[in-house]
Image (cartoon, rainbow, N blue to C red):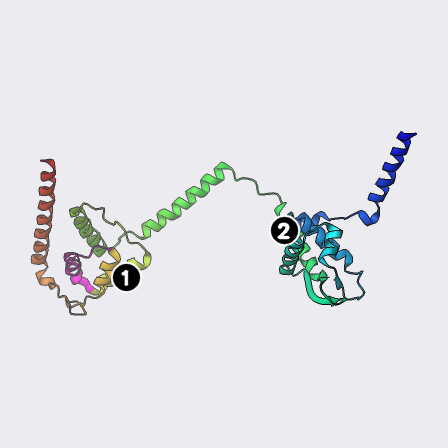
Amino acid sequence: MQQQSNQSGIIALLRNLTGQANILTVPRLFIDLLQNDLEGALFLSQCIYWSDKGSNDDGWFWKTFADWENELTLTYYKVNKVTQTLEQMGILETKLQKIKGAPTVHYRIDIEALSAWIMQFVEQRAEAQQPQPAAQPAKMRSTQRASKRAVKEAEIELLQPQTEGGYLLFNKLADEYGTLGRRAPVRFKSLVMKQRFEQCETRLGMNLEPAINDALAIPILELNRLIAYLGKWGTNGKRLDNKVQAQPAADAGSYTQDLQRKRDEARARVQEAAAANLN
């Protein structure tokens, strides 16, 4: 008899606990929408539930923080936090009005904004679940790499010197950089730079070599600055700003000899330093 009485009591308790007033439903979509915030999703679900239960038809309803705690077991802090989140998303509106003389928060769900968020979320999830394209076969990847190499080689070829003046420039740079023990540039850095040099070459004509010699004697070894320096030379063998006068084309031979002497002196100093280090 005692056992049957206990069983009846348990059954009655279960019936009371599982009545409609004691069930809180949370759509899984709301949990995902709020980035796995279960309590926030529960609050949103209940706000939607109460939206048409207020005394007005405009969707506004009011609840105290004590009401939320009794209904959802949510603390004041949690209710405030999820309210701010939903307001920032544009889903929830709030205002403060008095109820029975006490300031009380009123809530309203913006159904259109909520619908827009849900549609966006569903579309993004559908895109994420689309099958990824299959990995490209090794042969195709190899072909793509070969194509990229061919394009790169073609670009490098376009930057190579292709005129007599261009070969002269890079040969002189090779000599100067070799004297300093540095690696000389072997091509122009861009097509614009190459075009600028060829314009200087066409304009200077026979004065190109004295102009290059003058720049290297300063010395100007950086390619971009050197070409800019050539751009300041006039066809009369003088710099356009008249700050530095170069040797005219007729004296190019003696000027070259003087430059060679400077190179020889620099090499001798390098050799002496190397010998001193060996001793």
Reply above or below: 26 against 101: above
- Residue 124's label in the rendered image is 2
- Tag 1: residue type? Arg
Name the chief secondary structure element in magenta.
helix
- Tag 2: residue type? Gln
The magenta stretch is 204-222
The residue that mark 1 highlights is 196
Image check: 194 left or right of 117?
A: left
**Image position, residue 9 (x, y; %):** 87, 37
Q: How many marks?
A: 2
Query: Quick check: is 31 in the magenta stretch?
Result: no
**Image position, residue 217 (x, y; %):** 14, 57
The CA distance from mark 2 to mark 1 is: 51 Å
Q: Assign the N terminus to one quadrant of the image.
A: top right
Which quadrant of the view contains residue 49? bottom right
Image check: 249 left or right of 24?
A: left
- Residue 181's label in the rendered image is none
**Image position, residue 218 (x, y; %):** 15, 58
Looking at the picture, tell me which residue is in the foreground, 235 or 115: 115
